[in-house]
Image: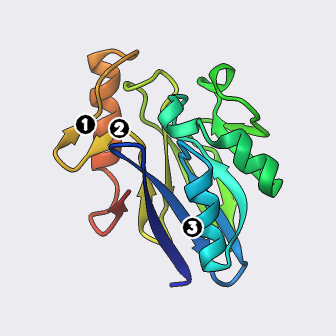
Amino acid sequence: MTVEIARIPVLDDNYVWLMHDGVSGETVVIDPAVAEPVLDAAAERGWTITQIWNTHWHPDHAGGNEAIKAATGCTIIAPAVDAPRIAGIDRTVAQGDAVPFGDYNANVIDVGGHTMGHIAYHLPEAQIAFVGDALFALGCGRMFEGTPDQFWTSLLRLKALPAATTIY
């Protein structure tokens, strides 16, 4: 597998993810709360950031978008429903859309409940998924905007992913 994942601790309790494809040279930032540590981590590895993927609108997941875009010229991809609350978006996506990344495609999954437009990105060929605050190691994210039924349906969608899938 040519995909490398780097975890960048930020704020008091968050992670930003860098995903790099060694074949294409593309690097995606997933849910950048802040810019500087992300830009530093990419530079340390010699990776060029080409995309940002947001799972939802909360500032601890999209606060670094504009500064990273200004520094790299990357493309920002974000959930269509949450788009009015996320700055600098180049493309919106929703359930069933695909986002290209090198030779891979990330399938967009609606996991609304934490926010109305919350999405996850699943790369089946790489057996990985980025789920934002929909799911944590010991439970699920807090339901701020959705309904219990909506959130339960979202969790069932994540449960339906293949067992070999690594969740970030």
- Residue pointed to by mark 2: 134
Q: CA distance from mark 1 to mark 2?
A: 6 Å
Q: Which residue is drawn at the image coordinates 73% and 40% (left, top)?
A: 66
The disc, 2 or 3, on the residue closer to the chain's N-terminal end is 3
Relative height, residue 97 to residue 57 (above, below): below
Disc 1, SS: strand
Q: Amino acid at mark 3?
A: Ala
Disc 3, SS: helix
Residue 104, by quadrant, is: bottom right
Q: Are marks 1 and 2 in contact (CB under 8 Å)?
A: yes
Question: Mark 1 or 3, which is nearer the eye?
Answer: 3
Q: Amino acid at mark 1?
A: Cys
Q: Which residue is drawn at the image coordinates 62% and 68% (left, top)?
A: 42
Residue 140 numbered mark, or none: 1
For this orientation, the residue located farthest to the left is 138
> Residue 162: x percent and y percent?
32, 62
Q: Are marks 2 and 3 in contact (CB under 8 Å)?
A: no
- Residue pointed to by mark 3: 41
Q: CA distance from mark 1 to mark 3?
A: 28 Å
Q: Which residue is drawn at the image coordinates 49% and 58% (left, top)?
A: 17
Residue 21 visible: no
Q: Nearer the viewer, residue 17 or 55?
A: 17
Q: Which residue is drawn at the image coordinates 48% and 70% (left, top)?
A: 5
Disc 2, SS: loop
> Residue 38: x percent and y percent?
58, 58
